Image (cartoon, rainbow, N blue to C red):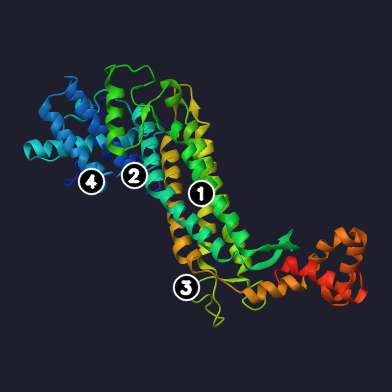
């Protein structure tokens, strides 16, 4: 349970007249603001969801007067809907349990409920932030619960749909480019032929696997710490409180949330969040691979590879007229770099589960939700502003393919590795194609040479 400290025991605090919150929130603002960063809205809305269902269940259990419960449910609903976002003023960097933001929520909900009941904003009567809004709860189980709820909602409603659109866009290009043969590249050197469609099919599969990975973490992320209160023992909470609250949240969200199997694990560790962040990092690495390949393939337009063209979105240089840059792939690269950085911070945060409580919950929550949101936005922009508008230069792909020394490879079964290598070396030194060198050296009958090479280059 959150300990109640009377205002006069810590000195007088002046709360802004338009605030629903009270002295504890204002004290945190005055003492702990270092970054100006605030919790992402989904986290605040998750807190409102928890408080809403907690008030309903406490009334059902006979622990909270119906009139007070109804007011708390209504004010918590406004928090869920984002109507009171501006009232959440505490800096992300605060006490490691997130108690300052939790108390901010309790005070805002109580203050708005009191306004509904009495016409007077704020205060502790008739609804008290600790005795009523926080009944049966603690920062130590509510904050981890809010992290899991917010992350699951954002992954399901935002990130996965955006990634699925990106996957579909890439798959569409894989089909559209399925007949365009081009040179493959390994070590950034010419390799045997592929189709442009095959390259794009690989990108589509990367995104598809990312979606599968995100779905796979659901069973762990859907376990909620609520009910453990201060240290995991459930002190001062009704034995049916957590299961009932979580059941209500599951119905409202459509996500199968359930009470943690072990409350000591759920509060002392943040392994499910660390796992989720690792998956987000994996998704980011996939996006980096795709974005960088598109930059390479579209490089030029005349002095690079130039096998594909990306949509032109803006002038690319303040000094070079006509230059167009791969804006969206570079945007994606920067988002992904930040996500990887967030994963490092979350990893360090996960290590800070000291005895019965993790003490880096605020930064874990902030970084996880930012990563989820940014990856979703990047995926949407990537699909809409880049992938869907890509075109292929079939003639250039064909030209590179015919000139490649890697075309010596299909001749190996007929003339042997060493003779094929010597042929490739001679073609390089004499500035001939493999076809021209093979015909000149008469390594095989002319018709056989054309048959073998034409089969590979798609002639």
Residues at badges 2 and 1 in contact (C-beta under 8 Å)?
Answer: no
Task: Find residue 43 and report its image quarter.
Answer: top left
Q: Image height check: is 77 above or below 128?
A: below
Mark closer to the chain start, 4 or 3:
4
Q: Position of residue 125 (x, y in %)?
A: 12, 30
Q: Name the disc covering residue 84, or none.
A: 4
Instruction: Report crowding for label 3: few under 14, some 14 to 19, many 20 or more residues within 10 A (C-alpha).
Output: few
Label 3 and label 1: CA atoms lie apart by 25 Å
Left or right: 430 in relation to 140: right
Residue shown at the point (38%, 42%) measured from the top left: 92
Instruction: Report crowding for label 4: few under 14, some 14 to 19, many 20 or more residues within 10 A (C-alpha).
Output: many
Residue shown at the point (43%, 52%) measured from the top left: 376
Mark closer to the chain start, 2 or 4:
2
Residues at badges 3 and 1 in contact (C-beta under 8 Å)?
Answer: no
Q: Name the disc covering residue 313, or none.
A: 3
Label 2 and label 1: CA atoms lie apart by 18 Å
Q: Position of residue 201 (x, y in %)?
A: 58, 56
Quickly name the residue at label 2: 42
Q: Image height check: is 46 above or below 62?
A: below
Quickly name the residue at label 1: 339
- The number of discs equals 4
Q: Image height check: is 172 above or below 449?
A: above
Mark closer to the chain start, 3 or 1:
3
Mark closer to the chain start, 1 or 4:
4
Q: Secondary structure at mark 1?
A: helix
Label 4 and label 3: CA atoms lie apart by 37 Å
Left or right: 205 in relation to 265: right
């Amino acid at each position: 349970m959150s300990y109640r400290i009377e205002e006069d025991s810590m000195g007088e605090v002046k709360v802004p007249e338009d605030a629903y919150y009270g002295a504890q929130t204002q004290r945190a603002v005055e003492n702990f603001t270092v970054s100006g960063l605030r919790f992402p809205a989904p986290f605040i809305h998750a807190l409102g969801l928890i408080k809403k269902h907690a008030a309903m269940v406490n009334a059902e259990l006979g622990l909270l007067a119906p009139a007070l419960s109804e007011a708390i449910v209504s004010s918590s609903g406004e928090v869920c809907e984002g109507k009171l976002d501006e009232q959440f003023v505490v800096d992300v960097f605060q006490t490691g349990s997130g108690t300052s933001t939790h108390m901010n929520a309790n005070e805002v909900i109580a203050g708005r409920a009191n306004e509904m009941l009495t016409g007077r904003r704020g205060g502790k009567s008739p609804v008290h932030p600790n005795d009523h809004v926080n009944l049966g709860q603690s920062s130590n189980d509510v904050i981890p619960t809010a992290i899991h709820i917010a992350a699951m909602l954002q992954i399901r409603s935002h990130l996965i749909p955006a990634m699925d659109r990106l996957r579909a866009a890439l798959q569409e290009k894989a089909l559209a480019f399925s007949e365009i043969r081009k040179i493959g590249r390994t070590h950034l050197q010419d390799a045997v032929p592929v189709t442009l469609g095959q390259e794009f099919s690989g990108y589509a599969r990367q995104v598809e696997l990312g979606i599968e990975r995100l779905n796979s973490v659901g069973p762990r992320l859907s376990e909620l710490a609520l009910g453990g209160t201060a240290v995991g023992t459930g002190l001062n909470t009704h034995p049916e409180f957590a299961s009932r609250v979580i059941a209500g949240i599951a119905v409202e969200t459509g996500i199968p949330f359930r009470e943690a199997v072990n409350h000591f694990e759920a509060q002392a560790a943040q392994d499910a969040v660390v796992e989720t962040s690792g998956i987000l990092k994996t998704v980011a690495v996939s996006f980096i691979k795709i974005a960088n390949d598109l930059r390479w393939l579209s490089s030029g337009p005349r002095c690079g590879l130039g096998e594909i063209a990306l949509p032109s979105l803006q002038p690319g240089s303040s000094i070079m007229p006509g230059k167009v840059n791969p804006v969206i792939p570079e945007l994606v690269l920067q988002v992904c770099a930040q996500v990887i950085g967030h994963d490092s911070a979350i990893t360090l945060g996960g290590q800070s589960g000291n005895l019965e409580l993790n003490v880096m919950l605020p930064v874990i929550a902030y970084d996880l939700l930012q990563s989820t949101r940014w990856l979703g936005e990047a995926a949407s922009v990537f699909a809409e502003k880049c992938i869907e508008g890509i075109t292929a230069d079939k003639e250039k792909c064909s030209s590179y393919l015919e000139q490649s020394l890697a075309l010596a490879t299909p001749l190996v079964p007929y003339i042997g590795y060493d003779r094929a290598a010597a042929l490739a070396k001679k073609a390089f030194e004499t500035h001939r194609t493999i076809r021209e060198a093979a015909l000149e050296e008469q390594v095989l009958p002319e018709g056989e040479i054309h048959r073998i090479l034409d089969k590979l280059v798609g002639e």
